Image (cartoon, coloured by chain):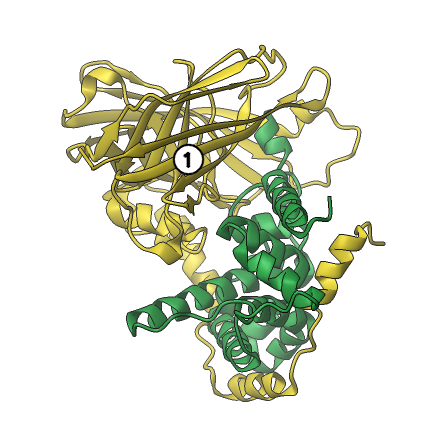
Amino acid sequence: MDEARALTLAGVPDEDDAELARAAAEDRAAFAAIYERYRTPVYRYVRARTATDADAQDLAAITFERAMGAIDRFHPVGGGMVAWLIRIARNAHLDALRKLRGRGAEPGVGAEPTVDPSDDAVVLRSLIDALPRAQRDVIQLRFAAGLTAREIGGVLGISEAAAQKQVERGLRALKEAYGDD
Amino acid sequence: MTTDTPFEQRLRTLYAVSVPTVLDRLIGTAMTTVPIRRSGRTRTRMLAALAVAALFAITAAGPAFEWFESWHAPFDRLWEISTPVDQTVTADGYRVTVHRAYADRFGVRLAVAVQDLKDRWSGLDVDAAEMTDADGRVYEAWNWSRSRAPVDGTIATWARFLLPDDVRGDDLHLRVTVTSLAARSPDPIPFDLDPEQIWTSIGGAWSFEFDMPPITQGHAISPVASASASGVTINLDELGVVPSGTVVRLTVDGLPEVPGSVYGWLPSTQIEHDGEPLSDQPFEPGVIGSDGVVTIEALPDVEDGDVEGLAGHWRITVYEFYAFDATIEQGRDFQGPWVLEFDVAETP
């Protein structure tokens, strides 16, 4: 029909996720399987966006609690459950930033402000933090949460092809800044 | 199997932290305290009631933000600033609802939901729609953003129509007819299937008539800004700030024809205002309309709050144009970048 649709054909429902969600909607204990499966991508994602372990723990807890409360509304579309959870995490993080700003505090996002040039990880983190927000976002979605282009598309509400392009653009910018051309 | 480059592996290592056990305890506690909101059985009963209600030809649909919420935050904003229409037409097993409408100097947007009452398809979409006003003027359908896949047989679409030049400032009485839906088979798609066969068109006539609120003008300017590269010249036609966000209209000269593409060349762009990038993530890429103009919509990142004015430094970058040529089944690139940079002293 048209290329835009042809590029988004990957939106195939994940029935396994749907089954997990149905079970958790009936029996809260069944949510443990969802947490077990997705705690690592969610935690790594929120850790990438926060300054401290404690902030990341709070945000991850809020994410899973919100997911628990809304599990009856989960539908296996747009990148599956991991994309759904990451969307919740992303919104929870934005809520937290707004509250911080409302109190006049500066939000702590990403790495520590002091960069030790001999520490490769710190340099990389500071360069990622310096990227335009859209590029930083896709880098964290890809490499912290470990999402595929389809899942990133599900989080951002864009096609798989557009998500892949954004990842490539972010990587290109990061490599240039890092000097890894 | 991983195809990561060493640089990408380094990035994964950078983020490879363990989940602290304290989180396990927090979630374990929450599982005993967060109440279950609604049972699956209750939900099934509610959906059955909705399906019965959908048998009426035209009804007040009521708010259906559920279909649109959490799709993407900027669309939440569009929902908030739009006006309820809430008209539903059911015909041939499909229920089409126009929930909301919004108009500014650049166009009309409609929040449209389509439901297949039998929930048969893995994809569903508004394939074509026509919009006219009381004076017979035609509004060109343009570049719709849609939800990913049906939920309970329903998809949500923000349909956009370009505003003809001579209606600016008018109150509008609009007639919209959805003339075709597109449905995608629920069966797995074989690799060798002709892409033309993946989607099926479903003809019909789901018609709506409603009054639009006065058009929001916002602010727009047309400063001189252009860039040329690789034989392609881009000129800024108009830059505007309206309640829905920032709109950039560009004229593009020098791109070759792509006869095998429906949309033609799609730009990859970035718009920066005073050094801050605006997000175009929720929108499909700008397409070249029948007037030869590329219209790009962008929003301030949700972290940055409200839409700003025009004053300040603007940098509009088109990195490349991309087209998928169905005749050769390949994508084609046209590389830039083209950078248009200018200052606006104050909002007119």
> x and y percent of residue B285 in the render?
49, 32
> x and y percent of residue A162 in the render?
59, 39
Q: Quadrant of the C terminus of chain A?
A: top right
User: Quick check: B158 left or right of B240?
Assistant: right
Q: Amino acid at mark 1?
A: Arg
SS under mark 1: strand
Note whether residue A176 is visible: yes
Nearest to the observer: residue B42 or residue A81: A81
Nearest to the observer: residue B232 or residue B179: B232
Which quarter of the figure has residue B58?
top left
Which quarter of the figure has residue B174?
top left
Neighbor class of circle 1 (other Cα within 10 Å; few <14, some 14-19, many 20+) is some
For image coordinates 66% across by 78% down, the residue present is: B19
> x and y percent of residue A62 in the render?
48, 76
> x and y percent of residue B17 in the render?
69, 74
Please give the residue where the numbered disc 1 appears in the rendered image: B315
For image coordinates 19% across by 20% down, the residue present is: B167
Position above or below: A126 against A167: below
Position above or below: A118 against B64: below
Note whether residue B206 is visible: no
Which quarter of the figure has residue A60?
bottom right
Q: Which chain is green?
A: A
Q: Colour of chain B?
A: yellow
